[in-house]
Image (cartoon, grey):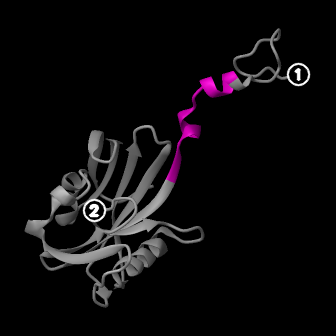
Amino acid sequence: MSRIWPGTTRSSRHTPSLRHCFMTPNIEKMTTRKLLSLVFVREASKILLGYKKRGFGQGWWNGFGGKVEKGETIMQGALRELTEESGLIGDSLEEIGLLTFEFEGDPVLLEVHVFSTTKFSGKPEETEEMRPAWFDIQDIPFKKMWSDDVLWFPLMLKGSKFKGYFLFKGLHDILKYKLDEVDKIEY
């Protein structure tokens, strides 16, 4: 029995041409997800941020986090990244947000799981990648941070859980976004 591929007829070849394969986009197959964590350490009315010294986001203040490695849970990845980037050991983390970032023209979506903690041990120390510093909540340096942070930080700071999607053009311009306060984080 011969098989007819989508876009072909019985009179044409019975396998799809390369032209057909590349001209029929399937968004689900074109995108992949990169799983990341982001941890914010809180103490009274202060938040610990890290100045990114190299790599993606260099020159900006952010929380501590990065790629979840193969074989790790998201929580394990978050705890590892916190220690690697700040020298702190998280005693417990609470997942407070789920953010998806798309960069125009890039088929990889960044799925960022956001955590917060007030329970940690050690003292923040500078690493090869980050320089930690405490900021009063009233003095967060939003002008030296990712442009989406100013939108969802208020939810984090008031103790809400949130879920959002951001489409960027380049690294600075938000083309569109959706941000919701949620009761619990669902994948």
Q: Residue at x 28, y 76 (%)?
A: 131
Label 1, secondary structure: give it.
loop
* Count of number-bearing discs: 2
Determine if the magenta segment contains residue 20: yes
- The answer to whether residue 91 is above or below residue 77 is below
User: Magenta region, mostly helix, strand or loop?
Assistant: helix
Q: Which mark is residue 2?
A: 1
Instruction: Identify the mark nearer the N-term, 1 or 2.
Output: 1
Q: Residue at x 33, y 69 (%)?
A: 53
Q: Nearer the viewer, residue 116 or 123?
A: 123
Q: Nearer the viewer, residue 110 or 164?
A: 110
Percent position (x, y) of residue 136? 11, 73
- The answer to whether residue 21 is above or below residue 103 is above
How many neighbours does mark 1 have within 10 angstroms: few (below 14), some (14-19), or many (20 or more)? few
Residue type at mark 2 is: Gly
Residue type at mark 1 is: Ser
Which image quarter holds the C terminus?
A: bottom left
Find the magenta span and give its range. 19-33
Q: CA distance from mark 1 to mark 2?
A: 58 Å
- The answer to whether residue 94 is above or below residue 142 is below
Determine if the magenta segment contains residue 84: no
Outermost right residue: 1
Outermost top residue: 11
Q: Nearer the viewer, residue 178 or 145?
A: 145
Q: Residue at x 46, y 42 (%)?
A: 106
- The answer to whether residue 139 is above or below residue 109 is below
Task: Find residue 21 and report its image quarter.
Answer: top right
Percent position (x, y) of residue 158? 16, 64
Q: Which mark is residue 59?
A: 2
